[in-house]
Structure formats: structure tokens, C-alpha cells
Amino acid sequence: MNQKKIGAFLKSLRKEKKLTQEMLAEQLNVSNRSVSRWETGMNMPDISLLVELSEFYQVSISEIIDGERKNESMQQETKEVALKLSEYSQNELKLEKKKVTGILLIGFGLFIIGTAFAIFPNESSWSSIYACLGAIVSSIGLFVLLNSFSMKKRKCAGISILSFILLFGFFMITDYITVTQFHQVPRFSYKKSYGENVVEHDTFFYTVIQTNPNTEKETIEIVY
């Protein structure tokens, strides 16, 4: 970087505007000495002042740093590069936002599932409703996260649907273990039939017979 050349360029730009050093100093709210030091190459303007000088003289910052005007083709090329860099930066920012959104949705969905299992008893239909809702939210979050890696939407959708199926399968397995090992009613039953001291819980794969519910003689029996 040739400070002498930059100073001479700044001086020529000032003269084109027919300004004295005092008038320019007043315009930029700096001292006369600062303007003099710039134009003699003794010192360089701060970055913020470079922006002001660029706007005031209607030249690019790169032209000031180079100490000369660029021809139109070079200016156009510079603008195109700047635009491409700006677009690239914006695209990267969008992708980062997608990643963060996807991770937050996955985390929030898993939180809903955990809360549904912890708060609601097996007998409550809200437990299965919130668990399924959490699985949907997590699957959507996975779709958004995968899409942020520029993966095709069809592939993202396929993986997200598969994740939901796996979560649903996990629900079914844990439900079966709860019934067979801990003798509790299933969470994920789509139908309940009430009789005298008997409740039938129909799931997708088996039926659970609950006799004498909420008493000391309560029994849980699974029927395939």
C-alpha cells in the first residue's frame, strides 16, 4: 500500500470538489492537520473515515486504497464479486439459521416426549397425544436440519418419515415392556371399552384386559 500515492489521490479528489483542506476538515469533523497528513502520505484515515470519504468523493474504498480510479470494467467486476460474496454470505447465514432451527425443533420435540412420559399417567390419553406430537416436531426438526446441508427435499422427507416410524416403534416397544414387565395399562391404545369392573385397551398389536381397575385386586392381562 503506497501511502504517498493514496495521499496524492485524496488531494486530487479534494481539488476536483474545489475544497480547501479547512473546508474538507469541517465537512468530516476532523482537524486541518489530519487532512494535511492524509494528503502528504504521513498518515491514513480511520476505516470509518474511509467510508465517509468514499461516499463523499463517490469513489470506492478499493480505489482510495489503490490511490487511483479504476476503469468501468474493473469497477463492474469488483461489484459483481462483491455481490456474489454478499449472496454467498447471506446463503451461509440462512443455512446456519436452518441448522439452529432444526436442532431446536429436535430438542423441543424430545422434551415434549420426555415430559409426556414423566407427567401424565399411562391411563391418560394426553400422554400418547403429546408423545406423538413430540415425535412429529422432532421429525420436522430433522427435516429442517438435513435440508440445511443442501440435501434434496425428497431424501430429507424420507429420512424424517423413517425417524417418526422408528420413534413410534420405540413407543410400541416401551409400551409392551410396561404392560408385560410392570403390569401397567398401555399408553398407546386407540380404543378403550368399559364394562363392569373391566376395561379393554386396544392397541395396534394386542389387547390389554384390565380387571378391577384402581383396586388391590387389579390385574392386567395381555391378549394377542
Image (cartoon, helix red, strand yellow):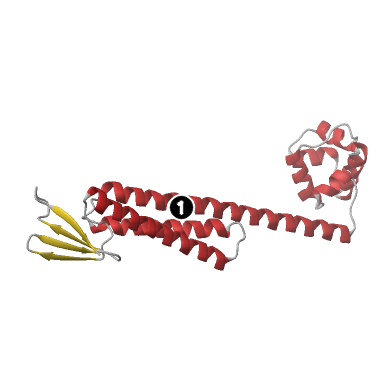
Q: Residue at x 25, y 53 (%)?
A: 180
Residue 51: % across, % down: 75, 45
- In the rendered image, the residue lying farthest to the left is 196
Question: Residue 162 vs residue 65: left or right?
Answer: left
Which residue lies at the image location 52% right of the left edge and 58% below the top edge? 144
In the rendered image, the quadrant that contains the C terminus is: bottom left
Q: Of the residues shown, which amino acid type is indicated by label 1? A: Ile
Q: Which residue is mark 1?
A: 106
Up/down of 213 relative to 52, above or below: below
Of the pair 195 and 81, the residue shown nearer to us: 195
Q: Could you say which quadrant of the image residue 123 lies in? A: bottom left
Instruction: Tell me the element at label 1.
Output: helix
Q: Nearer the viewer, residue 132 or 59?
A: 132
The answer to which quarter of the image holds residue 166 is bottom left
x and y, in percent, of residue 220 in the image? 17, 55
Position of 12 with respect to 24 (left or right) is: right
